[in-house]
Amino acid sequence: MITANEIFSIIQKDNFFENVFYKQVDWDEALDARDEVEFDTAWNSSYELLNDRVHSDSKVIRDIREFTFKQTFRITQNSELAAYASDDLDLISKAFDSKIDHTFINDLWAFYLNGEFPKASESGG
């Protein structure tokens, strides 16, 4: 399992966020898809699990959140999408840095690594 420092290094590489967000996609529709019960429940239960186990953010995790938000907004000009991406990377970084192996969070990271924005229709939860 990788660390938050390694995640930060990966997302700073050329074209990481461009591969995910520089596409002709209806981002409002993609965000709406994440409100479907299965995805929303899986995301929120993952968040709650981490909040129960991880009680503080490291500087690198705060930096990941900020970098993710700024890069996503730069590409898409969509602040809601940038906030979702920032929250995703926060969740992923906290889990990996705390050595918490969680299928849903691993799947979120896999989407980003494959240049895709995670959404309900493609996530098994």
Image (cartoon, grey):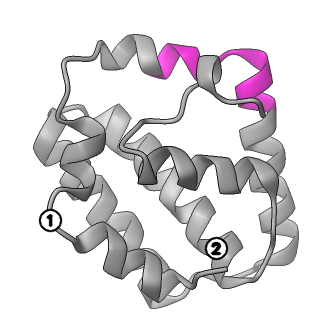
Regarding mark 2 in the picture, which secondary structure is present there?
helix
What's under tag 2, amino acid-wise?
Lys
Residue 51 sits above or below residue 88 on the image? below
Is the Cβ of the residue at disc 1 closer than 8 Å to that at disc 2?
no
Q: Is residue 32 left or right of 19 when viewed as pictured?
A: right
- Residue identifier under label 2: 94
Of residues 36 and 13, the one nearer the viewer is 13
Query: Residue at the spot x=12%, y=47% of the render?
Result: 74
Give the residues drawn in magenta, as a range: 31-41
Residue 55 sits above or below residue 17 on the image? below
- First in sequence, mark 1 or 2: give its number: 1
Q: Residues within 10 Å of mark 1 (few under 14, many from 20)?
A: few
Total marks shown come to 2
Query: Residue at the spot x=62%, y=60% of the render?
Result: 91
Query: Residue at the spot x=57%, y=71% of the render?
Result: 93
Q: CA distance from mark 1 to mark 2?
A: 23 Å
Whole-percent x, y for residue 59 in the image: 44, 89
- Residue identifier under label 1: 14
